[in-house]
Image: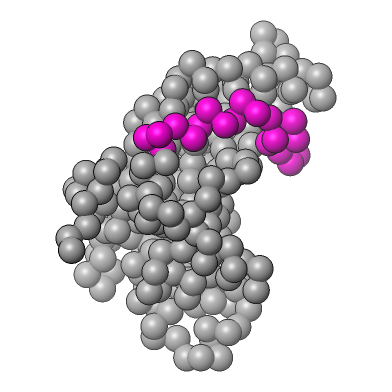
Amino acid sequence: MAFTPTTLSLAEIDCFHTDGFVIVRGAFSPSDARAMQDAWWAELAQVHGIARENRETWRSILGDLKQAKTSALQHAIATPRVKGVIDDLLGEGAWAPPREWGRVLTTFPEPGPWDVPTGLWHWDSPVDWHLKTLNALFVVSLIGAVAPRAGGTLVLSGSPRLLARHEATEGPMMRKGEYAARRESFYRSHPWLMALTGNAPSPADRIAAFMQEGAEIDGVRARVVELTGEPGDMVFCHPTIAHCVAPNRGVEPRFMRIKQQLMTRRGQALLKG
């Protein structure tokens, strides 16, 4: 029987499997996102002395906001539309709603140029967990507006397919090896990836080379994409998408949640070992 999605279009599902992510605008209410923003600002003021109305106090903090991570306000993210998207990608009944929607990220603006970073590119879930069946999602929820070059997470479009192919070419010892070694092996598998991750000299214009031009690697189109949008937007990513933190050179803080592994029930069993 042909698969019929309930919430995403077939084109959106194809985009997810081709690029490794799909953007859903207005996945949850902007007014609920603004209520979360207010709570985050209150915690920043109470715990860290960062006042919303006083930019001189603005600074990025170490770690996440603890109260916001468990706040009941986050349950507003789980709209019927969001649940429908996850059903379309993981399968209806294959997953359970998470207790919380991931890390609470507050990145404040800092001066300086903006460029595509070389370091900190990584993925959060073992590739072999998802080769036959997708057992998780990497979910980004925008709590505040994120403008271009204002701290939005960077993702490498096409990377889940590239990683799956690379995993297939690795010997069993490498597949069982340390994550750092496997990551480095992937970075060195193509000159474009080497330049992206600082393992080879960079092009003169990294933004043009990696975000605008991209590259075709073994028939897979690869390009760095900046996750931007408005409060209530969400991005549903393949769990092995390569991604990287980016500097905030905008005028407002980046308020974003990232659920690194929203697991299926089978994925939960893999996670527990």
Q: Nearer the viewer, residue 220 or 40?
A: 40
In the image, which residues are magenta? Answer: 62-82
Q: How is the image coloured?
A: one colour
Q: Is residue 187 left or right of residue 178?
A: left
Q: How many marks?
A: 0
Residue displayed at 74% across by 30% down: 67
Residue 82 horizontal/vertical position (percent): 41, 38
Is 246 placed above or below 229 here?
below
68 is within the stretch colored magenta: yes
Q: Is residue 242 among the parts visible in the rendering?
A: no
Residue 253 horizontal/vertical position (percent): 58, 25
Q: Tell which residue pokes out farthest to the top in this image.
A: 53
Residue displayed at 53% across by 45% down: 97
152 is within the stretch colored magenta: no
Residue 185 horizontal/vertical position (percent): 50, 77
Q: In the picture, which quadrant includes the N terminus? A: bottom left
Q: Nearer the viewer, residue 234 or 227?
A: 234
Q: In the picture, which quadrant includes the C terminus? A: bottom right
Q: Nearer the viewer, residue 48 or 30?
A: 30
Q: Is the magenta region chiefly helix, strand or loop?
A: helix
